[in-house]
Image (cartoon, rainbow, N blue to C red):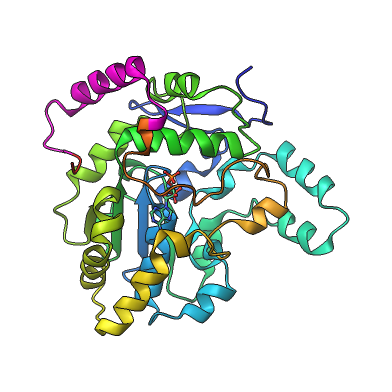
Amino acid sequence: KDFSGERTGFVEVGPKKWVFPSGYTKAAQSIYNFKLRSDDVFVATFPRSGTTWTQEMVWLLCNNLDFQTAAKVPLNDRFKFLEFSCFIHEKVKEEFLKENMANPEYYKIVQSIDNPRWETLTKSPERRFIKTHLPFSLLPPSLPQAGCKIIYVARNPKDVAVSFYHWNRSIRTQGFLGDFRKYWSYFHRNLQPWTPYWEHLKEGWNMRHEENILFIFYENMNKVNLRQSIEKIAAFLGRSYSVEELDQLESYLQFDNFKNNKSVNLDLIKKLGIILKDEEPFVRKGKNGGWKDYFDNDIDAEANEWIEKNLIGTDLRFPA
Ligand code: A3P
């Protein structure tokens, strides 16, 4: 009763009990065996951790700051979401097709919406840019040694929970109806897609010393250290740019500019009806510590205890 969406159902996967849309079951093996190329670039995150922002930065850094193509071609087409088709249940697709019947352009897009991205990527002759929310243990095991570059972005769980709450209200297949307190009760009990959050993060954290993996915190990237983060990521990707070019990229990625960027704001899936129109936009507030507006004392105490418990035995710590 807390969800209005045509939910696709969820599956629990493996001993860590990952929660995924049921379509993952069919995709799991193909994704695990996905053939890597040494020049692949991955952005891997738990959802709502600054994925889109990092993707756009990475794509531009690798593509000579080609702002023109970035404006013309939606980020989703330049940077494929590996497991996207797992969300699109047949029934949901049928409905989207029916709704978009009157518009041949949209109808055609919906027809290919559940094409497995790993197949498209396998056929692609171009350099591949890949987004995933899957944890490392479900990705091809040779990933750290395959020569490709992987940027893992982590964000503190309180802000992730708030951001994910809004996203789950927006996305029609979920259509979360409850308030934040209710959402939190699902999130911290690992009853939301891609949870358990901590396992996801720890798998990323444990990989941070691998030569081809860069582990970064959203909090460090946000506001004050954006320039430093751009430089760090550029160095990791083996790219260098002039001060003026970096100035331009930094300004392009600033929240106030980025939130008006049509190429990253999922305008198309909004038009197709996959996102409910009235909720907050995908690039929403972009704040460190925005959770304070949602957590009352009880939720905060519970969250702190949960965080403390999960940090035992790891040196993972979030930037202050
Ligand atoms: P909020 O909902 O807290 O605002 P993802 O791309 O992984 O789904 O992450 C989305 C989160 O990143 C959202 O957080 C969004 O606003 C934030 N974000 C996107 N672009 C940003 C930018 N340029 N600066 C800061 N935060 C940004």
Q: Is residue 50 above or below residue 122?
A: above
Magenta region includes residue 210: no
Residue 149 position by quadrant: bottom left
Question: For this view, does 6 lie left or right of residue 266?
Answer: right
Q: Is residue 286 above or below residue 68?
A: above
Question: For this view, does 177 lie left or right of residue 251?
Answer: right
Q: Position of residue 85 (x, y in %)?
A: 58, 48
Say which of 304 and 114 sits in front: 304
Name the quadrant of the N terminus. top right
Q: Position of residue 318 (x, y in %)?
A: 20, 40
The answer to whether residue 241 of the structure is visible from this angle is: no
Say which of 140 and 277 sits in front: 277
Residue for point 50% across, 60% down: 80
The answer to whether residue 64 of the structure is visible from this angle is: yes
Magenta region includes residue 309: yes
Number of marks in picture: 0
Query: How would you classify the magenta stretch by its main secondary structure?
Result: helix
Q: Residue pushed farthest right?
A: 102
Q: Which residues are magenta?
A: 293-317
Q: Position of residue 178 (x, y in %)?
A: 57, 22
Residue for point 78% across, 41% down: 95
Q: Position of residue 181 (x, y in %)?
A: 46, 20
Q: Is residue 224 above or below residue 198?
A: below
Question: For this view, does 162 lie left or right of residue 280?
Answer: left
